[in-house]
Amino acid sequence: MTSVEVLVEAYGRLPELVHRAVEGLDADQLVARPGGSANSVAWLVWHLSRVEDNHFADAFGSEEVWGAGGHADRWELPLEADDTGYGHSSEQVDAVRVASAQQLLDYFDAAHGRATELLADLEDEDLARVVDEDWDPPVTLLARLVSVVDDAVQHAGQAAYARGIILGRA
């Protein structure tokens, strides 16, 4: 198995994790914040989708699905268009609202679908390419892709846990 095949396998597990955390929840449940201050399922899935979308667009020199796919306009969030949720305050977490689980999944599926397309075109030798010179050492494509999938899996797990609390089955 090649390194790219391992990445494709890891990213391939995200849709099931995300869909299971979101499906069947209504708009109020999606934005409920366990304990009154934890991140909501909606924020967690929006954030992991935004990070995947943003980081892939940056690493591959493509447009973000968030803007190019019209999701930013449809969501009408009171946030900057390039906001990915990093460092959000409690008020900003509250601002990430959705009308339905489908709205949330439509964006995740679009962003993740684009990421999957980009992964499919990779060769192992591409993974050594430097994608961010602002760090010491500079960040390679491999490091960026591992970082994104690691972050996404953690947030998907947090969303599943929040779902359990919201439904009373922690």
Image (tube, rainbow, N blue to C red):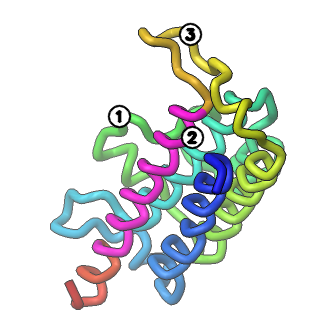
Using a 10 Å C-alpha cutoff, classify the residue at mark 2 as few (fewer than 14 neighbours), some (14 to 19) or many (20 or more). Answer: many
The amino acid at mark 1 is: Gly
Q: Which residues are magenta?
A: 142-161
Name above or below for residue 118 compared with residue 135.
below
In primary-sequence order, the first of circles 3 and 2 is 3
Tell me the number on the disc at residue 26.
none
Q: Residue at x 34, y 78 (%)?
A: 163
For mark 1, what is the residue? 87
Using a 10 Å C-alpha cutoff, classify the residue at mark 3 as few (fewer than 14 neighbours), some (14 to 19) or many (20 or more). Answer: few
Query: The residue tagged with tag 3: helix, strand or loop?
Result: loop
For mark 3, what is the residue? 133
Q: Which is the main secondary structure of the residues drawn in magenta?
A: helix
In primary-sequence order, the first of circles 1 and 2 is 1
Of labels 3 and 1, the one closer to you: 3
Query: The residue tagged with tag 2: helix, strand or loop?
Result: helix
Residue 148: where, in percent of width, then height? 51, 44
For mark 2, what is the residue? 145
Q: Is residue 46 magenta?
A: no
Query: Would residue 154 appear left or right of 107 to someone viewing this image?
Result: left
The amino acid at mark 2 is: Leu
Residue 97: tell me if it is visible. Answer: yes
Q: CA distance from mark 1 to mark 2?
A: 21 Å
The amino acid at mark 3 is: Glu
Residue 73: tell me if it is visible. Answer: no
Residue 13: where, in percent of width, then height? 56, 69
Residue 31: where, in percent of width, then height? 40, 68
